[in-house]
Image (cartoon, rainbow, N blue to C red):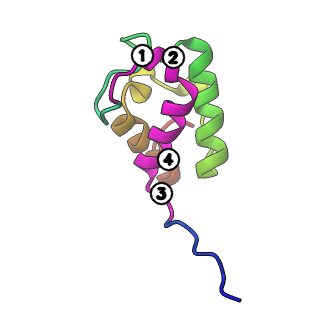
Amino acid sequence: MTAAKLPPAMSPHESVAAFLRSRFRASLAGRELALDLPLLSSGIVDSFGVLELIAFLEDTFEVTIDPSRLEMGELETVNRIVALVEQVRQGTGGR
């Protein structure tokens, strides 16, 4: 018996993009989710969505993000979200 082959781990960019595509499919309205697509200013992610996104980031990347110290621009694009996660892991942002 051979073990099932597991898919390779997703990169942080892929993980964030997959979550956004799944959760905000209706808001994306068929648009391609580019890594630099504005999420907040375009209305794809609203204020409730921000809280869901933060919860996803905390669960997925095992970080703690303090919403009261967060600048909304840090969640504007997939690239900026991943940069925020990296900063939090290094102890320099979002907490």
Residue on which disc 2 sits: 26
Residue on which disc 4 sits: 15
Q: Comparing marks 1 and 3, which lies closer to the viewer?
A: 1
Q: Is residue 24 left or right of residue 39?
A: right
Gap in angstroms between the C-alphas marked 1 and 2: 5 Å
Q: Badge 1: few (under 14), some or many (20 or more) residues near its Cα, within 10 Å?
A: few
Gap in angstroms between the C-alphas marked 4 and 2: 19 Å
Query: N-terminal of the two: label 4 or label 1?
Result: 4
Residue on which disc 1 sits: 29
Q: Which mark is residue 10?
A: 3
Gap in angstroms between the C-alphas marked 2 and 3: 23 Å
Gap in angstroms between the C-alphas marked 1 and 3: 24 Å
Q: Name the kind of residue labelled 4 in the image.
A: Ser
Extreme residue toward the bottom, this view: 1
Query: N-terminal of the two: label 4 or label 2?
Result: 4
Q: Name the kind of residue labelled 3 in the image.
A: Met
Query: N-terminal of the two: label 1 or label 3?
Result: 3
Front-most of 13 and 94? 13
The secondary element bearing badge 2 is classed as: helix
Tell me residue 38's x, y (percent): 33, 21
Q: Which mark is residue 68?
A: none
Whether tag 1 and tag 2 are in contact, CB under 8 A, the answer is: yes
Whether tag 4 and tag 3 are in contact, CB under 8 A, the answer is: yes
Tell me residue 19's x, y (percent): 54, 37
Extreme residue toward the front, this view: 1
Q: Is residue 55 left or right of residue 35?
A: right
Q: Is residue 51 left or right of residue 92?
A: right
